[in-house]
């Protein structure tokens, strides 16, 4: 690898950011529109060229990630209406392309790379009525590609927050329930026969929210209100800002490993209950990586001690929550043959909030898929979760009273 290539890899994200933000001395503002007619990725003699037509220039940055190989381009910000991956991608170097909202104010394009190609140049071409982002890719070796890959410093993921254990409830008090519709935006989740997990879970979260609000016993917050991408740690930050008493992540995955059918409740454990649970947790965490979010980072010693203390208090409450959720779903829609499983889902790692992940059903199961698309069945599932939360809240408050005596 040449010294020029090493230098380019070190400064690329900064250089592109500044080029996008200040070219021609103009102040660039959102919202830029994607222009399909001026956009494509095409093979050439060096490797491939990406052209992204926009109605105006906006700041942007790009970086590559490995395992799997992909190129991530962040824009502030772009309306992707009219984007068609099949028309955009004309290159053998790119196997798939997706776009979406990565967080409010930021849009993202992710290109899955079929082989190791590195970024040689990136910049902006300006014309009278449009702007083009032009990126030149060139063939490289797997080792050189891996050496240059990595998310830039200054991730879009929110800063970590140190936890304080959530207080137990008082009898008859309102519970703050945070519902987390899984996936969204650039990460649609599982897809089978036209059913999309991200869309279904947002629909179900709204239906469950309404069922909970009608009891008068709950305040309910959703981690997303639309088809947008929310990083895993961002979901936990939303829960903590809301003062969550309980956090429930909603999913309807598709499993390749074995057959799965029926509702399942997951709680956190570093040791997964089975191989399928382990792979499911890995796939959930991988969604952030596929979207280009850097999940790296280690807790310092003090933070770890504080989190362990909080988790010691929260863990038994979480187990009781899981038991009530299993019974509530069993009584209304039925459950998986092993209804309570454990795995290392990152979205469950808030040590201060009792948390559970519900696989309401599996899109890989034709029977479950049919049920998930049925509003009447979803209403029964919401009823089961509602009853479970009411029972858990009363028991949790009673336990808290005993501890105070």
Image (tube, rainbow, N blue to C red):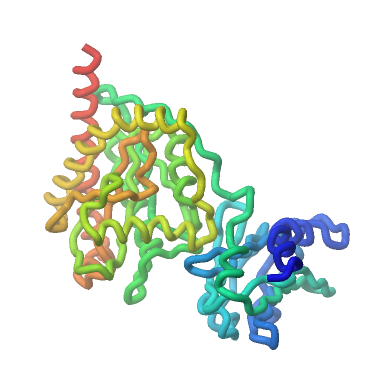
- In the rendered image, the quadrant that contains the N terminus is bottom right
Question: What x and y, as percent, mark residue 109?
Answer: 59, 67
Question: What x and y, as percent, mark residue 176?
Answer: 36, 34
Given residues 351 and 193, the one toward you in this image is 351
Give the residue drawn at x 35%, y 27%: 309
Tell which residue pokes out farthest to the bottom in this image: 45
- In the rendered image, the quadrant that contains the C terminus is top left
Give the residue drawn at x 34%, y 50%: 345
Q: Give the answer, above or below, for where 221 lies relative to 75.
A: above
In this picture, residue 377 sits left or right of residue 229: left
Residue 9: image quadrant is bottom right
In this picture, residue 82 sits left or right of residue 45: left
Q: Give the answer, above or below, for where 49 lies relative to 245.
A: below
In this picture, residue 138 sits left or right of residue 195: right
Q: Give the answer, above or below, for where 132 lies relative to 220.
A: below
Q: Give the answer, above or below, for where 231 lies relative to 188.
A: above
Residue 53 visible in the picture: no
Give the residue drawn at x 49%, y 34%: 300
Residue 44 visible in the picture: yes
Tell which residue pokes out farthest to the top in this image: 405
Residue 44: image quadrant is bottom right
Give the residue drawn at x 14%, y 55%: 338
Question: What x and y, as percent, mark residue 310?
Answer: 35, 29
In this picture, residue 392 sits left or right of residue 96: left
Given residues 365 and 266, the one toward you in this image is 266
Question: What x and y, as percent, mark residue 140?
Answer: 62, 76
Given residues 318 and 379, the one toward you in this image is 318
């Amino acid at each position: 690898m040449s010294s020029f290539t090493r230098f380019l890899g070190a400064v690329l994200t900064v250089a592109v950011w500044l080029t996008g933000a200040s070219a021609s001395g103009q102040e660039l503002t959102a919202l830029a529109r994607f222009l399909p007619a001026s956009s494509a990725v095409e093979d050439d003699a060096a490797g491939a060229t990406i052209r992204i037509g926009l109605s105006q220039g906006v700041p942007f940055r790009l970086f590559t990630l490995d395992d799997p190989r992909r190129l991530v381009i962040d824009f502030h910000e772009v309306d992707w209406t009219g984007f068609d991956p099949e028309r955009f991608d004309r290159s053998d170097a790119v196997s798939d392309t997706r776009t979406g909202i990565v967080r409010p104010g930021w849009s993202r394009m992710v290109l899955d790379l079929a082989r190791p190609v590195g970024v040689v140049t990136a910049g902006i071409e300006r014309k009278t009525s449009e702007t083009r982002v032009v990126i030149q890719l060139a063939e490289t070796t797997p080792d050189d590609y891996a050496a240059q890959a990595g998310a830039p410093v200054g991730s879009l993921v929110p800063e970590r927050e140190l936890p304080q254990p959530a207080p137990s409830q008082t009898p008859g008090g309102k519970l703050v329930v945070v519902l987390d519709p899984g996936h969204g935006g650039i990460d649609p989740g599982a897809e089978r026969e036209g059913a999309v997990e991200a869309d279904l879970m947002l629909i179900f979260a709204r239906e469950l929210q309404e069922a909970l609000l009608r009891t008068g016993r709950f305040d309910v917050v959703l981690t997303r209100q639309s088809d947008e991408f929310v990083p895993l740690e961002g979901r936990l930050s939303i829960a903590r800002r809301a003062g969550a008493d309980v956090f429930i992540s909603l999913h309807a995955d598709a499993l390749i490993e074995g057959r799965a059918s029926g509702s399942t409740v997951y709680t956190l454990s570093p040791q997964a209950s089975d191989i399928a649970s382990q792979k499911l947790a890995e796939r959930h965490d991988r969604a952030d990586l596929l979207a280009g979010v850097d999940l790296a980072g280690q807790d310092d010693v003090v933070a770890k001690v504080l989190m362990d203390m909080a988790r010691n208090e929260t863990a038994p409450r979480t187990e009781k929550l899981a038991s009530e959720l299993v019974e509530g779903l069993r009584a209304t829609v039925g459950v998986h043959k092993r209804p309570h499983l454990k795995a290392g889902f990152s979205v469950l790692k808030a040590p201060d909030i009792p948390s559970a992940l519900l696989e309401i059903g599996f899109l890989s199961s034709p029977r479950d898929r049919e049920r998930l698309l049925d509003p009447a069945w979803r209403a029964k599932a919401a009823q089961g979760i509602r009853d479970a939360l009411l029972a858990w809240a009363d028991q949790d408050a009673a336990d808290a009273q005993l501890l105070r005596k």
